[in-house]
Image (cartoon, grey):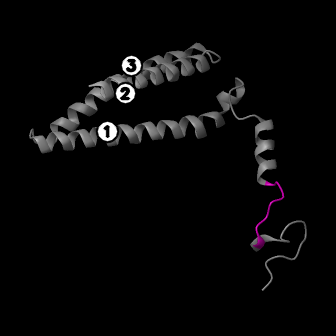
Amino acid sequence: YGATLAAMVVTGIADGIAQGSLFGMTSNLPTRYTSALVSGTAGSGVLVNLLRLLSKGIVPQTERGLRASSYIYFAVATAVCLACIFVFSRLLPRLPVMSFHGLGVKDTDRVLIEDANNSGWEDSSHAGSRAGGKGWEA
């Protein structure tokens, strides 16, 4: 019981931080984006309940079936969470609307990334391949 209660506290805190961060980020955007975030949050509650109903409905109501439905539910939920993390960290900052409102990847970030990629470190298989060097000789 204690472990379950502790897990609920941790997930509640994480949810509060995540939602606060998202609403804080959208406060820099026009109000239609905040409305979309609220609608998406409401829609996610409906989808979670539908997912649970479907995962319980497609398996027999035995102990083994209920365990399988739990595995299905948490596998789908994990996949959705991972997809959201990917979209939030990789795709969202590159959208033109985010750059327009100052929340996207900035040119200075790109320069820093390029500088890190071109830091001068080379492994021996590519030695001499830059700036007119011979490299890749047969």
x and y percentages locating residue 67 in the rendered image = 19, 41
Question: In the rendered structure, which amino acid carries the disc numbered 3?
Answer: Ala
Q: Position of residue 85 (x, y in %)?
A: 51, 37
Farthest right residue in view:
132
Residue wearing tag 3: 42
Residue 69's spot in the image, x, y percent?
21, 40
Q: Which residues are magenta?
A: 118-124
Report which quarter residue 100 is drawn in.
top right
Q: Is residue 113 left or right of residue 16?
A: right
Residue assigned mark 1: 74
Mark 3 near mark 2, Cβ–Cβ under 8 Å?
no
Marks 2 & 1, CB-CB < 8 Å contact: no
Q: Amino acid at mark 1?
A: Phe
Name the amino acid, label 2: Ala
Instruction: Look at the image and say whether residue 104 sits in the magenta stretch.
Output: no
Horizontal relation, residue 54 to residue 99: left or right: left
Which quarter of the rendered picture does the N terminus lie within? top left
Give the position of the C terminus as an image quadrant.
Answer: bottom right
Residue 119 among those drawn in magenta: yes
Above or below for 20 versus 63: above
Q: Secondary structure at mark 2?
A: helix
Q: CA distance from mark 3 to mark 1?
A: 20 Å
